[in-house]
Each structure stands twice: as C-alpha cells, then as structure tokens.
Amino acid sequence: MKSLLNRRSVLTGPSHVVRIPQNRAAMPASPADADDAPPDLASTAGSDAAPNPGTERQPDAVSGEVSGSASSSMSATAQAAVARGAPRPVLTLRPVQTVPSQVSARGVQIANTAEVEWLAEEEALTPFRVFRSFAYSVSLLFHAKELVYYVALYQEGALWRALKAADLEAAEAAFRHFEDQATRLSDCETRRAQLEAQNEQLARMIARSEAEAERLRSDLQRRSAQEQAASNRQHQVRKEVSQLEAQRMAAQAHLNKAHRQMQQLNMTSNEAIPHLPAR
C-alpha cells in the first residue's frame, strides 16, 4: 500500500515528472552512471524513500522564486533531492514578455505616404515645424481631426518617407531623427556649395589681382614713357640752351665790337669839333 501511495504521489504530483526507461532491465554499468541515471518507476515504487515534501512546490511558488535569468537552474533543495535519487522537479514556465521595437516603444509608426499626400492635398494638415536643407526637407504636420502627428521627409518636393505619432513628444523625436538624416544627406551638397562659393571668391580675387597687376603694369609703362619723354625733352632743352648760349655769346661779342666801333667813331667825331676859348 505504501508503494502504491508513493507511486501515486510521484505520478500525480504537480511538480514531478518521472521518465520511464524503455528497457527496465538495462542497469548502469558503473556507480557513477547509476547516480546520474534517473530511477525507473519500479525502483521508485519499491523504495521506501519517498520524495521530500519540501521539494514539492506549487506552480505559483516555483514561478515566484525562479528569476528570468536563472530559470534553467534548480534550487539547492531540488538538487539535494536529485542527489538522493528523487525525481527532478519540473519548473513552471513563465510567460515570455515581448520587447517592442524602438519605434513602437516611442509611439511612432510607419505612415502611409499616399494617405499623407491625400491629407496634404485636402489641406487637412497644419505644419508645426519645417526644416529644409538643399533638396531635402522635413515637416512636422498635425492632423487636427484625428489628433495625429505626421513627420514627412521630402526629396526635391516629393514625399519620401513618413512617420505617424499620437503625441507631440514622439513626433518631435521623429522630426529630429529626420532632420539629422536630411542634414547627413545634404552634407555633400553643403560641401559643394561651399567649394563653389570659395572657387567663385578665388576667381574674383584672381580677376582683381590681374586687374591690379595690369593697372600697375600700365602705370609703369606710362611712367617709363613719361620719364623717356622728360629725358628727351631735357636733352632737347639742353641742346637749345647750348645753342642759345652760343648765340648769346656771339651776339655779346658782336655788341662789344659795335660798342668799340661806336666809341672810335665818337672819338673821331669829337676831334673834328674846333677848340673854343673859354670866356
């Protein structure tokens, strides 16, 4: 009777499952194998060692004590029961909690682009924020009728991607995400615009430098021409001065000669005047 009760407690226990080997005659070859092998139903029924009532736990108790990280490990009491040859307790399985994705956790969903375009055509969306970077633009739109926020990413005016959120905070997070994406996408265009502006600035500086160099070259040429003209004029003037000086000296000599002749003639004329006695 005691064996039958033990068998019934083993078969009907809420936390024990006994595996019945197919060949009951097969015995372990070594004492170590005998310790590791689970006891069969006959040996369990014939032995007086009943399972420890302390090892029998209700499903709620087991599920409350077993943590998620150590759900596959047994308690010390269960290990002791296994070492004594008692059946292994079956741990109650806990429901697996599904971890939502990052977008779903933040309350953001993928929106239907056709729906967003239709709402935009119907002028049912109110723009809250708009970001534009070259060919890319991001809009935070509010559908007042449904109290829904849409975040749309446009490329060259065409709707590319759209997200949908039920609260403003999640929509602003999605808006910042699209804003960063549009900024990264337009990095090359930003660099191109900067390089074009720098090249145009360098071209203007080169043109100004070449014009300044041409002006300086013209000034130098004009100055050289003026200096050459001045030198020629000075040479011509000095030549004329030399000629005039020669003419002056010749004229002075001629004048001196004329004066001497006049003096001689005056002296000759004075000799012809009679000597009159004084009264």
Image (cartoon, rainbow, N blue to C red):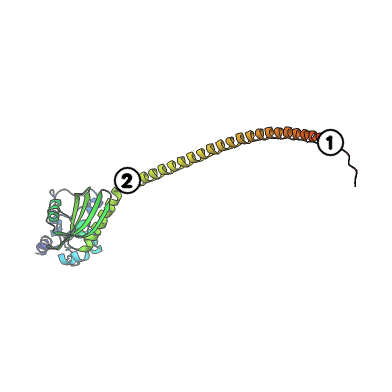
| Badge 2 element | helix
Kindly identify the residue that appears in the image at 53 percent across and 38 percent down: 222
- Of tags 1 and 2, the one toward the viewer is 1
Looking at the image, is 75 positioned above or below residue 214? below
Looking at the image, is 202 positioned above or below residue 140? above
The x and y percentages for residue 81 are 22, 61
Disc 1 crowd rating (10 Å Cα; few below 14, some 14-19, many 20+) is few
In this rendered view, identify the residue nearer to me: 206 or 101.
206
Position of the N terminus by quadrant = bottom left
Amino acid of disc 1: Met
Which residue corresponds to mark 1?
A: 267
Kindly identify the residue that appears in the image at 25 percent across and 54 percent down: 178
187 left or right of 49 in image? right
Which residue corresponds to mark 2?
A: 188
The x and y percentages for residue 133 are 28, 51
Q: Can residue 244 be seen by looking at this rendering?
A: yes
Amino acid of disc 2: Cys
